Image (cartoon, rainbow, N blue to C red):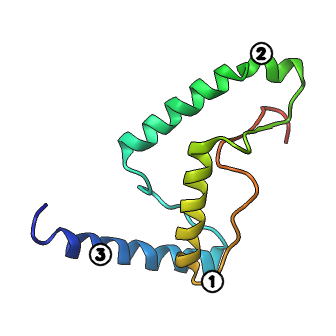
């Protein structure tokens, strides 16, 4: 690791956090890029697709006329969800509760 890595990363995230907080206060939302390294995000997407297919995929969702499919106990999503909730709590500088659902929630086309 380069000697100045921590300083550069701290500066980079300080700028991002300032922009995110400004967006949250003025718009009520903010786009947060690069939360996960690209390779980790791609692996998580592949994992979710495999789990989705193992559950029956689009075929089962159409048969059951699902509007929403959620995996409450899916372990990887639960871990990431808890991490992101804790991170978001530090970001907004107030306590947040972990939502009851994990990240992989799919709302089918035409359901909104």
- Mark number, residue 15: none
Q: Secondary structure at mark 3?
A: helix
Name the residue carrying label 3: 10
Dot 2 or dot 1, earlier in sequence: 2
In screen coordinates, is 3 left or right of 5?
Answer: left
- Quadrant in the picture for residue 58: top right
- Above or below, comparing residue 80 to residue 84 in the picture: above
Considering depth in this image, is 33 or 92 the residue closer to the camera?
A: 92
- Mark number, residue 94: 1
- Mark number, residue 59: 2
Considering depth in this image, is 23 or 70 the residue closer to the camera?
A: 70
For label 2, count other residues whose C-alpha is less than 10 Å away and answer few (under 14), some (14-19) or many (20+): few
Dot 3 or dot 2, earlier in sequence: 3
Considering depth in this image, is 86 or 5 the residue closer to the camera?
A: 86
Residue at the image position 68 percent from the left and 50 percent from the top: 102
Spatial separation of the CA atoms under disc 3 and disc 2: 46 Å
- Quadrant in the picture for residue 55: top right
For label 3, count other residues whose C-alpha is less than 10 Å away and answer few (under 14), some (14-19) or many (20+): few
Residue 85 at x, y = what percent?
60, 65
Q: Secondary structure at mark 2?
A: helix
Residue at the image position 53 percent from the left and 80 percent from the top: 22
Spatial separation of the CA atoms under disc 3 and disc 1: 21 Å
Residue 36 at x, y = what percent?
42, 52
- Above or below, comparing residue 100 to residue 63 in the picture: below
């Amino acid at each position: 690791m380069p000697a100045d890595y921590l300083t550069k990363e701290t500066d980079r995230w300080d700028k991002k956090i300032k922009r995110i907080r400004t967006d949250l206060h003025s718009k009520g939302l903010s786009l947060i890029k690069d939360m996960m390294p690209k390779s980790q995000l791609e692996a998580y997407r592949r994992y979710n697709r495999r789990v989705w297919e193992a559950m029956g995929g689009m075929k089962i969702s159409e048969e059951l006329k699902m509007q929403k499919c959620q995996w409450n106990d899916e372990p990887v999503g639960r871990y990431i969800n808890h991490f992101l909730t804790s991170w978001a709590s530090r970001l907004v500088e107030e306590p947040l509760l972990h939502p009851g659902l994990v990240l992989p929630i799919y709302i089918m086309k035409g359901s909104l």
